[in-house]
Amino acid sequence: MDMISIDGLHFSYGNTQVLENVTCNIRQGRFAALIGDNGAGKSTLMRLILGELPLGRDNGEIRLMDEDIRTFRRWNQISYVPQNGMAAWRDFPASCEEIVAANLYSQIGRFRFPGKKEKEQVRQALREVGMEDYENRLIGNLSGGQQQRILLARALVSQPGLLLLDEPTSGIDEKNTEEFYRLLTSLNQKRGMTILMVTHDRRRLSGMVDDIWLLDDGVARYVNPKKKKIAPAGHTAFTGNRFSRQPSVPADSSTHRKSGKAESSETPARATNPEKEEAPLGNL
């Protein structure tokens, strides 16, 4: 099953084209990364996947867990770790236990206290990220790396099937970054959790993730993590258990995006020799 399936997605802010014919899929149980330069549309794509931006009928298709996002209601099965998400909590006089338990409001009910079952869920989530000894600590008294692990525990407490993260290691040191990535890898391998992470940390990806998608000039292109190469436009990439044809990128597509125009609607031709046409990931 595809946990995320995107087909022919277009999105604009007014006359500014941000996403142009994005097509990609994330299979259940895969660990995928979304990379791209600043302004490439990664945050916009994430907001669309989260349902924070409206998707019109003419804007293409997003399916979550094989269901059209326009009618999707199982949001409790999806958790999100935002970039700099601790900013809203850093000075709040709450314990780590309370921060994590706050993500169970749909299960507990608003303005109600967690019961025995919910408290055990919180302890389990803290245990998974190695922070069970900090449950009574105030969140503001923790280091940046520890705070980020609490945010991860908060995302895990609802036991989601799909975990989305936006630059989760932004602003934390090298040691805590390595530990955070080990946690994500463990969640994916031991629990079979599907993960999609937006990141700029490209040098670590080849040994960690199953799939890499590069968002470039509004178009998503598949990168082979093992070869560290990007598939050329029109190349058919293997992603999990199925093949996905990638859209072609017009040679002057950057010009068309800036003017709000899209000229090429032709069916892309399959690359005849992708090995010669692929570019190293390190040069992206």
Image (spheres, rainbow, N blue to C red):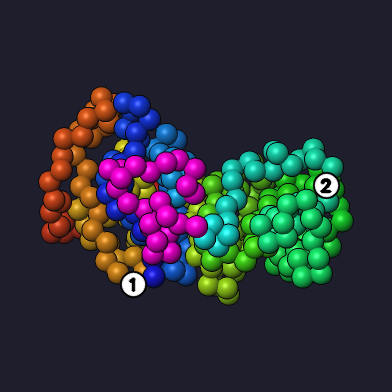
Question: Residue 3 location, x and y as percent?
Answer: 43, 63
In this rendered view, identify the residue nearer to me: 194 or 56: 56
Residue 1 rendering spot, x and y as whole percentages? 39, 70
Secondary structure under badge 1? loop
Say which element carries label 2: loop
Q: Residue furthest bottom?
A: 190
Q: Is residue 54 magenta?
A: yes
**Residue at which label 1 appears:** 241
- In primary-sequence order, the first of circles 2 and 1 is 2
Main SS of residues in magenta: loop
Mark 2 and mark 1: span between their CA atoms? Answer: 44 Å
- Residue of label 2: 94
Viewer-side residue, 3 vs 280: 3
* Kind of residue at badge 1: Asn
Image depth: mark 2 or mark 1 in front: 2
Region of the chain picked out in magenta, as a range: 50-73
Instruction: Report if residue 4 is visible in the image.
Output: no
Residue located 79% across and 38% down the image: 91
Which residue sits at x=84%, y=42%?
Answer: 93
Residue beneath the point at 42% across and 59% down: 64
Residue 133 appears anywhere in the view: yes
